[in-house]
C-alpha cells in the first residue's frame, strides 16, 4: 500500500480522497495538523475531525500499520485527551500487538516517554506511568526476533522520509521554537538525534534511543526521590538498580546508544535533575 496510490472512501458521503502514496498522505496531513493547531483560538481547540476520519480508514487497511501512521493517529487522540498518558500508552501498545519482534512496539513509545519528561503532573502519578512503561518494555523485550517467514528484520525496516514531519506533530505542543527532535527526544544525546534525523534511519535504532530515554527517566525519578539520602547510600542504590535493570533492555542498540552517550559527555545531567517536578 505504501508504494502505490491511496484512496480513502467515505461511502456515506459519496466521496473519496486520493493520495499518490503514503508519504504524500503523511506529509499533507502533518502540515494540515500543524496549521490547524497554530490557528486554533486556544490549546486543544483545533478541529481535527476530518483527520480522524481519514486515518481511521487508513488504519483499517493494515494488519500491522506503519509506525508513522500510528503516531499521527495517536497524536490526534492525544490532542482530544491531553495528558492522559495511560490511554496513550494503551493505544500505542494495542497497535503494536500484531508486530513481530520488539523493535517497532518499543519505537512507538517515544511520544509517551517524551510526554512523561514534559509532564507537570505530581511525581507519584508520573512514576506510576513510568513503571507501566518499563513493565511494557520488559514484556516487549522478551519477544522472539521475527523469523525470515515474517518479513524483514528490524535492522532492515526503515523509517519513512515523513518521519521528521511526525516528530514536528508530536513536538509542537511543547515548543515551536526549539528543534523538534530536541523536544521529542529530550534525553537523547546530540549524536543520537543526528542519527534519527537521517533519512532511512532504522526502526531498531529508534527503539534503542527510546529504551535509553526510558532508562534515564526512571533514573531521574529515583534521584529526585532521594532527597536527604546520604550520597554513598544513593550511589549504592542507583548502582544496584541500574545493574538489575539493564538486562531487561535486551537490545544491542540500547547498549550502543547508552555507551555512546557515556563516551560523549556531558550527559543531560541537568535535564535528569529537573525534568519532573
Image (cartoon, rainbow, N blue to C red):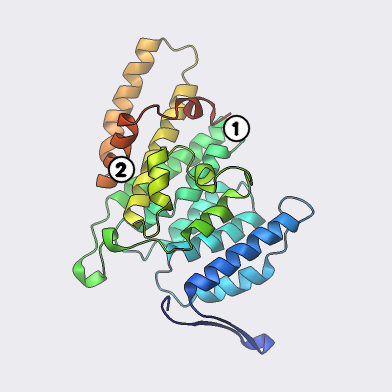
Judge the density around disc 2: few (<14), some (14-19), many (≥20) Cα neighbours within 10 Å: many
Q: Residue at x 37, y 48 (%)?
A: 195
> 117 above or below 20?
above
Find disc 2 in the rendering and name its residue. Answer: 254
Find disc 1 in the rendering and name its residue. Answer: 122
CA gap, disc 1 and disc 2 = 29 Å
Q: Position of residue 36 (x, y in %)?
A: 70, 61
Q: Position of residue 38 (x, y in %)?
A: 71, 55
Helix, strand, or loop for circle 2?
helix
Q: Position of residue 15 (x, y in %)?
A: 65, 87
Q: Residue at x 39, y 69 (%)?
A: 64
Q: Residue at x 51, y 42 (%)?
A: 182
Is residue 201 something one can see in this rendering?
Answer: yes
Q: Residue at x 36, y 47 (%)?
A: 137
Q: Is residue 142 left or right of residue 198?
A: left
Number of marks drawn: 2
Q: Position of residue 139 (x, y in %)?
A: 33, 50
Amino acid at each position: 500500500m505504501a508504494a502505490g496510490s491511496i484512496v480513502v472512501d467515505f461511502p456515506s458521503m459519496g466521496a473519496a480522497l486520493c493520495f499518490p502514496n503514503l508519504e504524500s498522505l503523511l506529509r499533507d496531513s502533518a502540515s494540515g495538523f500543524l496549521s490547524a493547531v497554530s490557528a486554533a483560538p486556544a490549546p486543544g481547540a483545533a478541529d481535527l475531525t476530518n483527520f480522524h476520519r481519514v486515518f481511521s480508514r487508513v488504519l483499517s487497511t493494515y494488519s500491522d500499520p506503519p509506525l508513522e501512521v500510528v503516531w499521527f493517529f495517536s497524536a490526534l487522540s492525544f490532542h482530544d485527551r491531553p495528558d492522559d498518558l495511560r490511554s496513550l500508552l494503551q493505544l500505542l501498545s494495542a497497535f503494536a500487538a500484531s508486530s513481530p519482534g520488539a523493535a517497532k512496539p518499543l519505537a512507538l513509545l517515544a511520544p509517551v516517554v517524551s510526554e512523561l519528561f514534559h509532564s507537570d503532573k505530581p511525581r507519584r502519578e508520573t512514576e506510576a506511568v513510568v513503571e507501566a512503561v518499563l513493565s511494557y518494555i520488559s514484556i516487549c523485550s522478551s519477544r522472539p526476533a521475527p523469523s525470515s517467514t515474517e518479513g524483514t528484520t528490524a535492522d532492515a525496516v526503515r523509517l519513512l522520509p515523513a518521519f521528521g514531519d511526525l516528530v514536528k506533530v508530536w513536538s509542537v505542543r511543547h515548543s515551536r521554537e526549539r528543534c523538534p527532535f530536541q523536544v521529542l527526544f529530550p534525553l537523547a544525546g546530540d549524536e543520537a538525534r543526528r542519527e534519527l534525523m537521517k533519512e532511512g534511519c532504522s526502526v531498531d535504532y529508534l527503539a534503542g534511543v527510546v529504551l535509553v530515554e526510558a532508562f534515564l527517566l526512571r533514573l531521574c525519578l529515583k534521584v529526585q526521590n532521594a532527597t536527604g539520602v546520604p550520597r554513598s547510600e544513593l550511589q549504592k542504590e542507583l548502582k544496584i538498580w541500574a545493574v538489575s535493570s539493564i538486562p531487561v533492555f535486551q537490545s544491542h542498540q540500547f547498549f550502543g546508544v547508552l555507551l555512546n552517550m557515556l563516551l560523549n559527555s556531558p550527559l543531560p545531567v541537568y535535564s535528569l535533575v529537573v525534568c519532573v517536578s
